[in-house]
Structures are given as C-alpha cells and as structure tokens.
Image (cartoon, grey):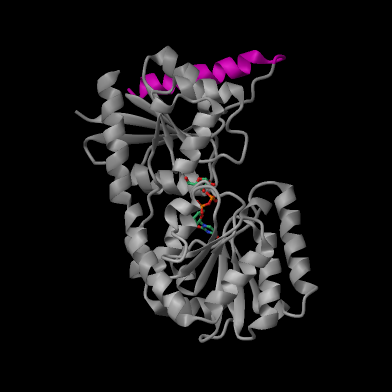
Amino acid sequence: MSRRILFVDTFTCLGGAEISLLALMKHLKAGRYVPHLLTSTDGPFPGQARKADIPVSTQEFPWFSRRRPWRYALSIYQLVRIIQDSRIDLVHANCDHSLRYVMHASRLARVPYVAHVRDFVRTWFQPGKVVALNQAMRVIANSNAVAHACVQAGVAPSRVTTIYNPVDVETFRAVPATAGTQLRAEVGIPAETLVVGIVAHIQPIKGHMEFIQAAIQLADRVSDMHFLIVGAPATGESNELFLERLQARVLASEYADRFHFTGFRSDIPAVMKAIDILAVPSWAEPFGRVTVEGMASGCAIVGTEAGGLPEIVTDGVDGLLVPSRSVDALSAALYRLAVDSELRQRLAQAGRRTAQWFTITDHVEHIQALYDAVLSAH
Ligand code: UDP
Ligand code: GLC
C-alpha cells in the first residue's frame, strides 16, 4: 500500500533546505511513498518540484494576529482540507514558519507529523516552536550539532534523530574537468591559476566578510591566485547592502581584478570544478551542503570548526578546520594549501571518499525507515 506524504515548506526560493528536500521527494521509493508539496506561493522551489511531477499546492500562512485571528484559523482549516482531500498519511514540516500550522492541522486531521530542523541560527527555538517540536512524532536534525541544539532548547532527546543531508555525489564526481576550464574562461580566470572559492547565499553568517579580508591578505602573498564568490544575496535588503560592502572592500584593495562575483549559479557541479580550494567560513553552519559538494568535486576544503562542519570534515585528513570568524586563521590555512600542492591533493582525495557518506540513497533509506516507524506506531 502506498503512503502519501505531505511536505510543507513556505519558503519558495532554492536554499539548502529546499534543495535537500527536493532530493528526498524525487527519490522516495516509487509506489511505496507518494510525495505532495505544500508551499506559500509560486517560485523556483515549487517550480522544480512540478518539473519532477510532484503535485504542488499553495496556500497563505499568515502570522497570528490578535486583531485578525480568523485568518490564522482559516489557514489551519485549509491545511486540514488539503490533508483530507489528498488522503495524506503523514505530514513532514521542512524547518520553517509552517510548523505550528502543521501541528494544529495534523491534530485536527488525526495524522502524524514529523519536523525537520536544519538550522540553529534563526528563530527556531522560540517557546511556541519547541512545543510544536515536542508534539511531532519525530524530529529530524541535519547534524548532531543541530540535534544537540534541539535538546538544549527543550526537545525530548528520545524524539530527535540525526539524518545527514542528501547530496548528489555522483553528479558532482562525474563532471569533467573541462567544465571547470570553461567556467574559468567565462568569468575571466586564467586556466592554470589557483582558484579559491566561496559558494553560499550572501549574508554575514556565511563568513563572506572574513573570506574577503583573508583573500586580500593572501593576494598580497600569493600572486597567482584568483577568488571566486558564487551566490546571490539571501533574501532581505540588508543582504543586498552587505554585498555592496563586500564589493566596496574589494575595490578599495589593490587586487580587484582577481576577485570575481558571479551571482547565483544553477550549475554548481561545474562551478566546483573551477575551484581548487573551497572555503566554508560560516560562523556556525548547521550542516553545509556545499562542503560535501566541494569534496565530491575534488576541492580541498577549509571550513570552520563550528556547528555541523566538524562532523563532515576531519581536520588534517579531508580538509582543514579553523576557528570561526578568525580572518588570520582562515588566511593562514588558505596559504598553507596554496603553497603545498601535495597537501591539497591528499585532502581532496580523502574528501572524495568522505563525500560518499552523504549519498541520496542512504538519506532516503533512513527517512523511509523513520516514516515506517512513525506510521506503524500511529
Ligand atoms: N547554491 C546554488 N547556487 C548558488 C549558490 C548556492 O545552487 O549560486 C546551492 C549550493 O550548491 C547548495 C545550496 O545552494 O546546494 C546551499 O546549501 P547549504 O547547505 O550549503 O547552505 P544554506 O544556504 O542552506 O544555508
Ligand atoms: C539550512 C542550513 C544548512 C543546511 C541546509 C540543508 O539552510 O543553513 O547548513 O545544509 O539547511 O539542511
């Protein structure tokens, strides 16, 4: 008998949480689980789901307001209708604003729900959210660091399970080196130059400012090196301004011609091939898909020893770890790799093996086993 799973995620852009969820929805065992996505409006994320023939519904998720409580109640009622009309067996909330709506609607419709927690930076652990996490049949954390944060916030440890994100390791591995050469030519980087890259939605917590400062120090010491900054500002006007500040910092240095801002790219497997050293200088990355993508592509990784990154990277074995928010430590680690091609190769080779721990197949199997346990207990 097939089980119908309703995924709820109100965010409509393609962040790591959405890319991870798409991989899961697309690879659920056909015939056994049927995915259905509920989101808030149209956008790139529901667009990708539709392309994969996953049915998509949209509805509003208005904030609770004492002046207009009926709008909130109505949206819960709409969600109950979707659960009933689509004969949903289980609801899976993907780490966002929808969690409390899912809690109320699932209770009314008498179906179980699970909650995915992928973040500890934003407002995840407000009291109302913790209540909704504790009512979920299971809480899925994308790293042990996030699982620990859930427990610290008051979620019962017995509910929390770590399941690492799925990365299409094979696609990243299989891209030919020529894709990187072409990309370098497109952005104006010489083919033989050493490239240090950062791939992340642009916002302070991803460590872009530390990256730019470390890169400027490095540009002073290593002449044959370029810097690739891939990603668009994360949503919010402050992130647009942050990008302007980063660009101004580069322009004020003597090395502006060695920095390349590409904006958002939808060809990250090719982008990774253009990068020799991938920096992941996030202040505290809950998981960090790009780390595994870089490893699968054969980049040498420099990450921060914070959040979930130490669960992926073992310092000195398949990457280097530096204290978070330290420009000097980041610059020193990048320098170490810049001048030592043997070390770069050794780390990259080990990184390719590490990436194999994060395949889509393993992720999907773990999630399906969790669904089965929840459905049989319900
Ligand atoms: N990404 C992308 N294009 C870009 C920048 C990033 O497709 O220009 C992708 C990247 O390949 C990764 C995801 O966005 O799969 C970011 O996920 P991650 O977990 O690293 O960070 P998040 O943005 O979720 O905090
Ligand atoms: C969040 C986290 C990121 C994680 C992604 C997918 O966006 O910031 O670290 O990889 O979710 O779970």
Q: Does residue 321 show up? A: yes
**Rendered view: 312 above or below 369:** below
Q: Is residue 115 left or right of residue 336?
A: left
Main SS of residues in magenta: helix
194 magenta-colored: no
Identify the image quadrant of residue 353. Answer: bottom left
Q: Horizontal placement of 296 versus 235: left or right? A: left
* Residue that extends furthest to the left in the rendered view of this protein: 1
Q: Quadrant of residue 255?
A: bottom right
Residue 82 rendering spot, x and y as whole percentages: 42, 23
Pinpoint residue 161: horizontal percent, then vertical percent.
38, 34
Q: Nearer the viewer, residue 237 or 112?
A: 112
* Residue 49 against residue 181 in the figure, above or below: above
Judged from this view, the residue extending furthest toward the front is 316
Q: Looking at the image, which residue is at 45% across and 76% down?
A: 343
How far across and down, in percent of the image, does residue 78 sit?
49, 20
Give the total number of marks visible in the rendering. 0
Q: Up-down: is 273 above or below 3?
A: below
The image position of residue 174, as x and y in percent, is 33, 69
Q: Is residue 101 visible?
A: no
Please state which of residues 191 and 284 is positioned toward the viewer in this rendering: 284
Which residue range is magenta in the image? 66-88
Picture quarter with the N terminus: top left
Q: Nearer the viewer, residue 374 or 141?
A: 141
Q: Quadrant of residue 195?
A: bottom right
Residue shown at the point (32%, 38%) measured from the top left = 367
